């Protein structure tokens, strides 16, 4: 093979690799994201990357040149100098200047990341094992976001479901966090149990959610879309099943969604109608509670005892979403960490003790106090009336009394 072919072969390989790398660029590199911060972070990342590439090329060029130019066959007698003050000054000053050049844009980006002032809305994010709680501060809207049912079923051992057949496997939830585009949103992050970490790659930031402490971050999303992330702090057995899904929508669509969450119509949400809405809700509070059963308060539920069928239905839904991963759909559990509920002395024993354990947790079992009184009453009733257990139902009022 001629010298020309020897040179052409690696050159063609480099060109082919570069073409493939360009095609898979988004896969191998960090995303540019959809916020001003994420683009700044991406720009900083690429700046440092090319600085490092330039340094690497220079260092290795000098390295290989030295090997070639000062090989023994050309220089059988080695040099006798010991040191060079000039060289030492040069290789000290140049890295110092490089670090200063990198620190200036990096410092500006860090300051911008920490500046959550002038936020137009605030969302409180609370980490639980293993779900997220979202509260729109000042809007009286809050909900729990869990791994969606399809992914949860597919991840179970022996489910027979191919995870590849589930769209967005382990990256979809039952309730997405919805925020408006072109709006500076401040996130306040905390935790109810252990340390979690809330991360959406396209936002360019993540923050730890720490019990008893509030962290802060912000995002201003430019483009409507669905953005997915995960908990990035090892937080227990189901850490890998705690996705974050944020849906960014135009401000007008967000206002309609927010009004729906409040049980209002879009017209009711207009500022000029606020007084009339408040008066109407005050005059027809009972009717509104009936029409919006999903948002009925625990106190109202306690006043009207639920029949066993309704409790069983609510309990089965809550059990599958929160308990089945450990105690299994059959109630057999995974002893010794997660004991069987079939014939369990705790399940069939003192009702108050059982409710308190569900509320506060015990050993490997996390607390579920964030669930509504109806959900907890349903779970207790469901477990006490399934798999051969034959204890009586529990009402939401029983749970509410023990919370106090």
Image (cartoon, rainbow, N blue to C red):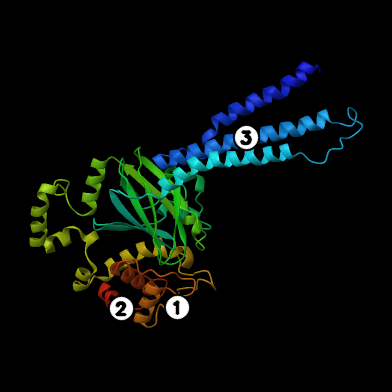
In the picture of the structure, the residue carrying the numbered disc 3 is 53
Where residue 180 appears, as percent x and y from the top left, is 30, 44
37 versus 64 height, above or below:
below
Label 2 sits on residue: 402
Q: Mark 2 or mark 3, which is nearer the start of the sequence?
A: 3
Label 1's element?
Answer: loop
Q: Residue at x 47, y 62 (%)?
A: 195
Query: Which quadrant of the figure contains the C terminus?
Result: bottom left
Indicate which label's residue lies in the foreground, 3 or 2: 3
82 sits left or right of 194 in the view: right
Distance Cα–Cα, label 3 vs label 2: 63 Å
Distance CA(mark 3)–CA(mark 1):
63 Å
Q: Pinpoint residue 246: horizontal percent, then vertical percent.
A: 37, 47
Query: Foreground: 161 or 248?
Result: 248
Which residue occupies the foreground of this view, 274 or 280? Answer: 274
**Residue drawn at (45%, 51%) of the image:** 206
Residue sitting farthest toward the front? 85
Q: Which mark sits nearer the N-terminus, 3 or 1?
A: 3
- Foreground label between 3 and 1: 3
Residue, disc 1: 344
Left or right relative to 134: residue 203? right
Q: How many neighbours does mark 3 have within 10 angstroms: few (below 14), some (14-19), or many (20 or more)? A: few
In which quarter of the view is residue 5 placed? Answer: top right
Residue 155 image offset from top left, x and y in percent: 50, 55
Q: Residues within 10 Å of mark 1 (few under 14, many from 20)?
A: some
On screen, residue 231 versus residue 89, left or right, reads: left
């Amino acid at each position: 093979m001629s010298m020309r072919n020897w040179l052409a072969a690696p050159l063609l390989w480099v060109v082919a690799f570069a073409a493939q790398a360009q095609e898979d660029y988004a896969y191998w590199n960090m995303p540019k994201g959809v916020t001003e911060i994420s683009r700044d972070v991406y720009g900083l990342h690429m700046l440092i990357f090319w600085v490092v590439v330039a340094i690497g090329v220079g260092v290795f060029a000098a390295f290989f040149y030295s090997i070639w130019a000062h090989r023994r066959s050309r220089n059988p007698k080695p040099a006798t100098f010991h040191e060079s003050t000039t060289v030492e000054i040069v290789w000290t000053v140049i890295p110092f200047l490089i670090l200063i050049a990198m620190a200036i844009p990096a410092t500006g980006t860090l300051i911008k990341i920490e500046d959550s002032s002038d936020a137009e809305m605030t969302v409180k994010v609370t980490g639980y094992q293993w779900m997220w709680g979202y509260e729109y501060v000042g809007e009286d809207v809050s909900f729990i976001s869990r791994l969606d049912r399809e992914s949860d079923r597919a991840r179970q051992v022996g489910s027979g479901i191919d995870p590849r057949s589930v769209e967005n496997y382990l990256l979809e939830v039952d309730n997405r966090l919805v925020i408006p585009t072109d709006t500076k949103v401040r996130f306040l992050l905390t935790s109810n149990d252990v340390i979690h970490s809330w991360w959406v790659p396209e936002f360019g930031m993540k923050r730890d959610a720490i019990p008893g402490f509030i962290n802060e971050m912000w995002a201003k999303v430019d483009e409507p879309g669905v953005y997915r992330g995960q908990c990035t702090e090892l937080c227990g057995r189901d850490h890998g099943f705690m996705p974050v899904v944020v849906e960014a929508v135009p401000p007008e669509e967000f206002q309609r969604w927010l009004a729906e969450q409040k049980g209002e119509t879009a017209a009711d949400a207009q500022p000029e109608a606020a007084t009339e809405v408040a008066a109407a809700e005050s005059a027809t509070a009972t009717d509104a509670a009936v029409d919006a059963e999903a948002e009925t308060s625990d106190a109202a539920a306690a006043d009207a005892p639920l029949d066993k069928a309704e409790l069983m239905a609510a309990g089965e839904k809550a059990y599958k979403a929160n308990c089945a991963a450990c105690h299994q759909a059959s109630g057999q559990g995974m002893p010794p960490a997660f004991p069987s509920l079939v014939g369990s002395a705790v399940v069939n024993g003192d009702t108050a003790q059982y409710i308190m354990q569900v509320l506060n947790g015990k050993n490997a079992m996390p607390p579920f106090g964030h669930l509504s009184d109806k959900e907890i009453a349903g779970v207790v009733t469901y477990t006490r009336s399934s798999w051969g257990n034959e204890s009586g139902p529990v009402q939401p009022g029983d749970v509410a009394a023990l919370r106090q």
